[in-house]
Amino acid sequence: MLVDPPRQLAEPPIPGGRVEALMGRLIKVLAHSPLARPLPAVALSALGLFGVAFAGLCATAPNPSQVTLPVLLPLTAAVQHYIGMPVLGDGLEDGLMSASIVLSVLGLAMMLWANSRGWSPSPRKVFWTAAGAVAVLVNITPVGSADVASYAAYGRIASLGLNPYVVTPSQLPGGMHNPYTALVSPQWRNTPSVYGPIATWTHLLAAEIGGARPWLTIWALMVMTAAAFVAVGYILLRTAANPVRAVLLWIANPLLIVEFVMGGHLDNYLALAAITAIVVSRRCARRWHDLVVGLLVGISGGIQINAALVALGIAIPLIHDRAWARLARTAATALVTTAALYFFSWGFTALKPVWTASKLVGSPVWRLIPVCARAIDPQSLPTVTTVIGIAWAPLMLALAWYLYNRLSPDVPTVLAATCALTFAWVIVAPWSLPWYTSIAWVTLALLPRNSLTRWLTLATGTLALLHFNGGWPGITGDGPTP
């Protein structure tokens, strides 16, 4: 029994304007072209993944690359030992990554167009094929992000009995001579963990497995995050009204495999907790269901702070229905769970690094403003940063409301609200990275076809093109952020 009612709108959805109309005409032409066929669509997707995997197989150690971490995971080490791989220069790596990301975006778009024209593969076969590909790719050196090295360092700090929310990777025993510290991007070696206690426990578990071998810790982290990615795909397969579209948008999505799996990001855990909470909330019929939803929301808060958007998305239909008792039970359980996770782990000092990181400005939308302010008057930079910190939240809510109204009034409110909020956050937040789109993608996969799919694809693809440097000097903006 679903208690989440369809949304009721007093007015028709807000039109998208000329840009939306132009995009719609372009997509209509492409969707009916010979390109929108299953074989070329799958071929381009596979080619995009192969390009990124090739970059990972060409990783070198100990010399850091601009694209990959200077660590060899099992498949990379085996291929280099038995076959040998060429050493790619930075320019060639950048070109390979850019081309692969573009191919991944095109492959995804073409698969969705083919699906809209009647292509309907077995969702189970698609799921297991994609899961098999993920199982192979997690054995390749991480590509495009240095976050997993920071995760490993925080886990090592915790395994030594230290507080990762106070101690930084550069303060590990031996300093720069510590193998964990050496893997962390230079710009983040003096940054404490900004992740929740549950995330840190996963880092600790991997570090206990790896011990003094950081490559093994990173491999364990890659396997765990990939398992969460596959688990999300399985939930979507079992719960989506259109399972073919759901598996194409998540587990068989080449762009997400590149960002979420080959980057080893813990945003997969957040997506797993969020989609589980949303699915249970839509089936709530008894009081204990509200407690389960609250528990899952609290667990999400113990992973990353942006789980507050999931909590708000779940609360909106309850507020709409004036289900105050259910709202109170869910909210109280979520707050108690999150507070207990922090209090009984490393304490509320774990929130201090999050507050510091929230002042960073690196989004393409906002980055130009501090640059111009610094050029005009360097002393105005703190004021400009403060103004951005105040302005982005109401702007995000305004954009979320616009996106919310762009969706059909017949879709469940909890899905529409959560998708709109998380998508708007990715666009407007001062610090935005491609893997921050995980919740937006996982909720979009449960929605019927809509125009937000094209914009989320473009937003994720653009962010991916801006952030594939592995966190090393050359291109700034990548690193451990909440």
Image (spheres, grey):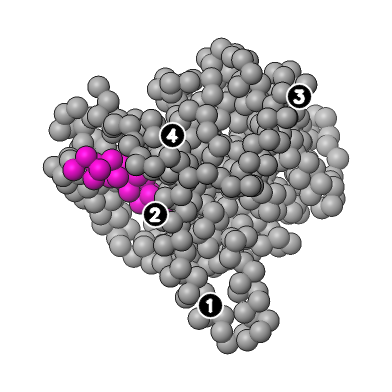
Left or right of 134: which side holds 335? left
Q: Nearer the viewer, mark 2 or mark 4?
A: 4
Q: Amino acid at mark 4?
A: Ser
Q: Dot 2 corresponds to which residue?
A: 305
Is disc 3 surrounded by few (<14), some (14 to 19) or many (20+) residues within 10 Å?
Answer: few
Look at 64% across and 36% down and name the residue there: 24
Find the magenta span and give its range. 306-322
| Residue at mark 2 to residue at mark 1: CA–CA distance | 24 Å
Do callouts 2 and 4 mark residues in contact (Cβ within 8 Å)? no
Residue 408's tag is 4
Q: Dot 1 corresponds to which residue?
A: 384
Q: Main secondary structure of the magenta part?
A: helix
Q: Amino acid at mark 3?
A: Ser
| Residue at mark 3 to residue at mark 2: CA–CA distance | 43 Å
Left or right of 177: which side holds 296? left
Q: Dot 3 corresponds to which residue?
A: 33
- Which percent across, then down, holds residue 194? 45, 59
Task: Compare marks 1 and 3 and give the one earlier in the sequence.
Answer: 3
| Residue at mark 4 to residue at mark 3: CA–CA distance | 27 Å
Per the image, label 4 sits on a secondary structure element best described as: loop
Look at 25% across and 22% down and name the residue there: 1
Task: Compare marks 3 and 2 and give the one earlier in the sequence.
Answer: 3
Look at 70% across and 18% down and name the residue there: 38
Q: Amino acid at mark 1?
A: Val
